[in-house]
Image: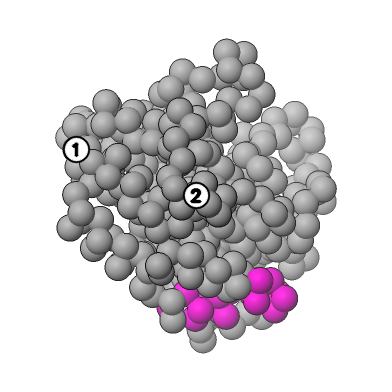
């Protein structure tokens, strides 16, 4: 199939992955953007293996390994996560791979957030899927030590019920970062940026398991992992809440939130203060996170979303951006 934008970075005039994306995703190997198998064949292999895994929200994930220049299915030593289109009760599910890809690219390219390397890839019959390189697998094949915040907070379905991933607050995650991360002043600003990003881009499923720490091989300290599972959920779940978790612990609400039932600028100012970010740094972060609108529009227009959802995606961003301007 013919494409016109890089299925990695979305830059125009590319008929496959550009050189930079080949390097980031595949260590420079010339991997084609079209897989050698179709979706039915893929699903058949996974049914027989009995190892289908579910991701949070609306997608399934499957494991791939790179052999020479070819991606193949694998049950062990996986290097990539492949997310095909899922079935279910949500809207516009055929657009989920393009949505996640676009949101991840905006996070990395516009806001310089550290994300897992990712792209769009196509089955042999042209059906799209989202592909992400596993950041927890080192080039040596060794798995780095990683724990998500459900594990760190010692919350499971057995101990805290079915909503264990959501019955928490972003403020409490911040407290856990302070407790376990020596480089807290640096990492907490990264954390604040991703919460602000998730709000701007309507990611209503950023729950406990979608934030993780890993132990640095170089320093031995715990740091935030690259960010993952970034998606504009408003395109698939209309009317979803602004954020997956409460911003503040113990039911605290700002006066502005009580008045409008919406998070606005005063909420994020209070949130930054509670995380220990000083006013000067907070204002700098706000300026940076509220800039980049033209680049956001450029990436939306170049994305693999259909035209209808490109409009909805931009509308949701503009709406949230406006709330934070005053």
Report helix, strand or loop for mark 1. loop
Comparing 187 with 171, the one in front is 171
For residue 216, which quarter of the picture? Answer: top left
Say if residue 163 shows up in the picture: yes
Across and down, in percent, residue 18 comes to 45, 74
Quadrant the C terminus occupies: bottom left
The magenta span reads: 295-312
Q: Residue at x 49, y 26 (%)?
A: 150
Crowding around mark 1 (Cα neighbors within 10 Å: few <14, some 14 to 19, many 20+) is few
Residue 180 against residue 121 in the figure, above or below: above
Residue 311 against residue 81 in the figure, above or below: below
Across and down, in percent, residue 171 comes to 39, 36
Q: Pointer 2: what residue? A: 257
Q: Residue furthest bottom?
A: 13
Q: Residue at x 44, y 48 (%)?
A: 255
Query: Considering only order in the chain, which callout, 1 or 2, is on the residue closer to the N terminus?
Result: 1
Q: Pointer 1: what residue? A: 183
Report helix, strand or loop for mark 2. helix
Comparing 92 with 290, the one in front is 290
- Magenta stretch: residue 301 in it? yes
Is residue 324 rendered to the left or right of residue 160?
left
Residue 144 against residue 28 in the figure, above or below: above
Q: Residue at x 63, y 27 (%)?
A: 163
Across and down, in percent, residue 219 comes to 17, 35
Is residue 306 rendered to the left or right of residue 31?
right
- Judged by its main secondary structure, the magenta piece is helix
């Amino acid at each position: 199939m013919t494409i016109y934008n890089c299925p990695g970075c979305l830059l125009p005039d590319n008929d496959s992955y550009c050189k930079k994306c080949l390097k980031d995703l595949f260590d420079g190997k010339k991997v084609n953007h079209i897989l050698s198998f179709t979706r039915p064949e893929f699903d058949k292999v996974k049914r027989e293996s009995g190892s289908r895994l579910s991701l949070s929200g609306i997608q399934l994930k499957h494991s791939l390994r790179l052999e020479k220049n070819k991606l193949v299915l694998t049950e062990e030593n996986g290097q990539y996560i492949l997310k095909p289109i899922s079935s279910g009760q949500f809207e516009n599910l055929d657009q989920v791979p393009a949505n996640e890809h676009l949101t991840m690219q905006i996070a990395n390219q516009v806001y310089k957030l550290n994300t897992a390397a990712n792209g769009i890839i196509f089955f042999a019959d042209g059906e799209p899927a989202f592909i992400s390189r596993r950041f927890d697998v080192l080039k040596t094949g060794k798995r780095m030590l990683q724990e998500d915040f459900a594990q760190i907070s010692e919350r499971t379905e057995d101990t805290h019920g079915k909503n264990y991933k959501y019955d928490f607050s972003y403020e409490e995650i911040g407290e856990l970062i302070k407790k376990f991360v020596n480089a807290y002043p640096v990492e907490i600003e990264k954390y604040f940026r991703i919460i602000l990003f998730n709000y701007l881009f309507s990611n209503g499923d950023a729950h406990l398991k979608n934030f993780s720490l890993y132990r640095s091989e170089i320093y031995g300290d715990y740091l935030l992992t690259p960010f993952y599972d970034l998606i504009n959920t408003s395109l698939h779940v209309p009317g979803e809440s602004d954020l997956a978790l409460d911003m503040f612990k113990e039911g605290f609400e700002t006066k502005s939130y009580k008045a409008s039932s919406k998070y606005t600028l005063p909420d994020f100012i209070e949130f930054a203060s509670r995380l220990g970010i000083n006013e000067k740094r907070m204002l700098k972060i706000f300026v940076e996170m509220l800039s980049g609108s033209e680049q956001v529009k450029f990436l939306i227009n170049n994305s693999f979303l259909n035209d209808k959802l490109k409009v909805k995606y931009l509308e949701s961003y503009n709406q949230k951006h406006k709330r934070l301007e005053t």
